[in-house]
Image (cartoon, rainbow, N blue to C red):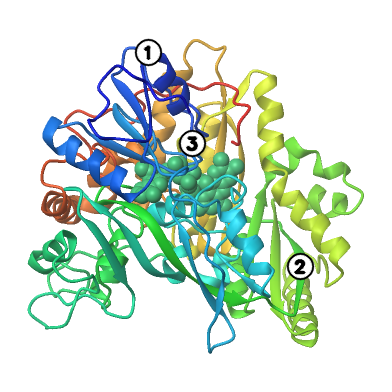
């Protein structure tokens, strides 16, 4: 990058610095459907190393300039784009240390926060290890971005989201003080003694120790905490209440409490065998039943493709799954891991489960069929891009809602009704077993009233999700899109607790303002700019 000589570059900063149109061009390279107006004041910084990042944070404190952490830019809800200085943490924090074996047969690996997730998997695989929560965006998303969003992947159904795989975090707090915190030493709150897990005399540790949450999940007078298999909305007070510490609070904090520079990951041993089974669900009640049964069957993944996905993808004509797709309301893809014998037994049980509902489906341990079935699921992005060329632009604004799995059918039915009333088609698929549904509405941008229709859909989906006890983000985070709904989803008491927490850790509100917590009058659809995007959607 050419370093800009003029503008507002901090004194002593050695990394790349862009302003004006150059900054807009660099910052605008995101997967989400947002774009800042050309007159928004924006700079782009690429710190070279930790010292450079500290310099930037100190400058931001002096100048009162907001900082927006940026990894790979694949985040959906606008957390990676806002007015201020977009801080790209990809270039300066790309170190990969070799994976180390651990006594449980797995391993650990320390990487810079800017390392691409797919690279971690490559290095892990060379040692017979794997990062099981790898997202579909692994070729582009950074580990820092994943941690910041508490990202997950298809196999998180069996193995949990990334919060289960983080052993230690390094970074810099709002004042520019570096920290490191680890999982072994967990936080102690409310005078229980112990350490927060951070190195001595560091700012963030002090703040953790002086943080006195007014309310934690499980407190006798606390409102219910959403009962979900996964969640990346709000702050993880549930994990803190369960004995977690600063590390647990930072995972999923979307760049609003600290900027992450390094992550130590736990890795699992790669399984001996995998098998995949595809089952049809003819009704939404059966969809719910399959989602619940998948956990009992010990599946590592439980994905689904909705009716609209099958129609738009033309699956009815597919030589392998055509018959199933013609009759199903949804197709369920279950994956099993273990020894070859264990996988065969699990596939038999999946077949029996299907036979008792809408048909035994098809499945195998053979890599060819497993790959072909996974490819159906991975066909979402190209399909979405194709529709954009026909004037229906996939616009992610309700793309990550999560409900308790027992409410999956009710959510799908409610969603279908809302979209039908607005006359908007959508590609629907996702992590059925976790109750996490990806909805990509195909917005007819050539029709003059697309925006009020989008607003109505968003408002109605927020009401539906609230009714069903879910949140708007299973793995993508709240960003700027969902922040204005924080109070509606979480209720006033949790929303207040989240605000107090943010004010405690970032009193001047310089780290990603408007993300998770809304700014005064924040419009969820501000800067929404549906457009065909060539970069990963
Ligand atoms: C095609 C496609 C498929 C996807 N599939 C999945 C999937 O399977 N599972 C899933 O969970 N998500 C998925 N996503 C969403 C996205 O990839 C994830 O949210 C990912 O975690 C974002 O990582 P990133 O490096 O791109 O972060 P960015 O988009 O750059 O940033 C995301 C958020 O994290 C913050 N952040 C980034 N880096 C740091 C840091 N170092 N320190 C502090 N804060 C930081 C940003 O401020 C922002 O709030 C997909 C996206 C696309 C485009």
Q: Residues within 10 Å of mark 3 (few under 14, many from 20)?
A: some
| Residue 418 numbered tag | 3
Whole-angstrom CA distance, mark 2 to mark 1, is 48 Å
Q: Which residue is painted at 32% across and 30% down in the image?
A: 82
Q: CA distance from mark 1 to mark 3?
A: 34 Å
Q: Which residue is mark 1?
A: 38
Q: Is residue 221 left or right of residue 10?
A: left
Q: Residues within 10 Å of mark 1 (few under 14, many from 20)?
A: few
Task: Report the Cα–Cα distance between label 2 and label 3.
Answer: 33 Å
Q: Position of residue 29 (x, y in %)?
A: 50, 29
Considering depth in this image, is 411 or 6 the residue closer to the camera?
6
Residue at figure coordinates x 27%, y 57% from the top left: 235
Find the residue positioned furthest to the right: 319
Q: Nearer the viewer, mark 2 or mark 3?
A: 2
Q: Residue furthest bottom?
A: 103
User: Which of the two labelled residues, at mark 2 and mark 3, occupies the earlier sequence position?
Assistant: 2
x and y percent of residue 61 in the render? 14, 38
Residue picked out by circle 2: 276
């Amino acid at each position: 990058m050419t370093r800009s000589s003029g503008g507002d570059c901090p004194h002593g900063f050695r990394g790349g610095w862009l302003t004006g149109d150059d900054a807009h061009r660099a910052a605008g390279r995101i997967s989400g459907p947002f774009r800042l107006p050309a007159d928004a004041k924006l700079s782009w910084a690429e710190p070279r190393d930790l010292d450079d990042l500290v310099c930037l944070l100190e400058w931001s404190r002096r100048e009162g300039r907001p900082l927006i952490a940026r990894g790979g830019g694949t985040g959906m809800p606008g957390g990676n784009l806002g007015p201020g200085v977009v801080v790209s943490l990809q270039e300066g924090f790309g170190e990969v240390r070799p994976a180390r074996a651990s006594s449980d047969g797995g391993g650990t690996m320390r990487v810079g926060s800017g390392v691409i997730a797919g690279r971690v998997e490559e290095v892990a695989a060379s040692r017979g290890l794997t990062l099981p929560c790898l997202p579909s965006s692994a070729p582009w998303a950074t580990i820092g971005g994943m941690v910041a969003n508490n990202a997950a992947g298809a196999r998180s159904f069996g193995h949990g989201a990334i919060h289960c795989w983080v052993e230690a975090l390094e970074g810099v707090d709002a004042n520019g003080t570096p920290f490191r915190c680890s999982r072994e030493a967990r936080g102690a709150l409310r005078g229980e003694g112990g350490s927060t897990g951070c190195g001595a005399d560091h700012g963030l540790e002090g703040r953790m120790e002086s943080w006195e949450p007014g309310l934690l999940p499980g407190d006798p007078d606390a409102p219910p905490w959403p009962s979900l298999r996964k969640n990346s909305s709000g702050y993880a007070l549930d994990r803190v209440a369960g004995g977690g510490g600063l590390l647990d609070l930072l995972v999923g904090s979307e760049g609003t409490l600290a900027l992450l520079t390094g992550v130590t990951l736990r890795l699992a041993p790669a399984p001996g065998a995998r098998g995949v089974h595809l089952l049809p669900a003819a009704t939404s009640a059966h969809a719910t039943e399959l989602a619940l049964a998948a956990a009992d069957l010990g599946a590592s993944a439980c994905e689904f493709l909705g009716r609209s996905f099958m129609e738009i993808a033309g699956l009815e004509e597919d030589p392998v799954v055509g018959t199933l797709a013609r009759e199903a309301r949804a197709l369920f893809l279950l994956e099993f891991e273990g020894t070859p014998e264990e996988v065969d037994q699990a596939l038999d049980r999946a077949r029996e489960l299907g036979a008792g509902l809408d048909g035994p489906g098809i499945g195998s341990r053979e890599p060819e069929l497993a790959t072909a079935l996974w490819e159906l699921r991975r066909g979402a992005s190209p399909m979405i891009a194709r529709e954009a060329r026909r004037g229906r632009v996939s616009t992610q604004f309700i793309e990550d809602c999560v409900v308790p799995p027992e409410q999956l059918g009710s959510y799908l039915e409610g969603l279908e009704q809302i979209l039908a009333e607005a006359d908007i088609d959508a590609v629907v698929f996702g992590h059925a077993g976790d109750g996490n549904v990806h909805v990509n509405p195909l917005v007819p941008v050539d029709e003059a009233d697309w925006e009020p229709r989008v607003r109505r859909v968003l408002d109605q989906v927020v009401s539906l999700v609230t009714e069903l006890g879910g949140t708007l983000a299973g793995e993508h985070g709240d960003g700027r899109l969902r922040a204005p709904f924080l109070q509606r989803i979480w209720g006033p008491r949790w929303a207040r607790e989240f605000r107090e927490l943010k004010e405690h850790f970032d009193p001047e509100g310089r780290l990603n303002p408007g993300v998770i917590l809304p700014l005064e009058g924040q419009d969820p659809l501000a800067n929404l700019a549906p457009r065909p995007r060539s970069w990963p959607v």
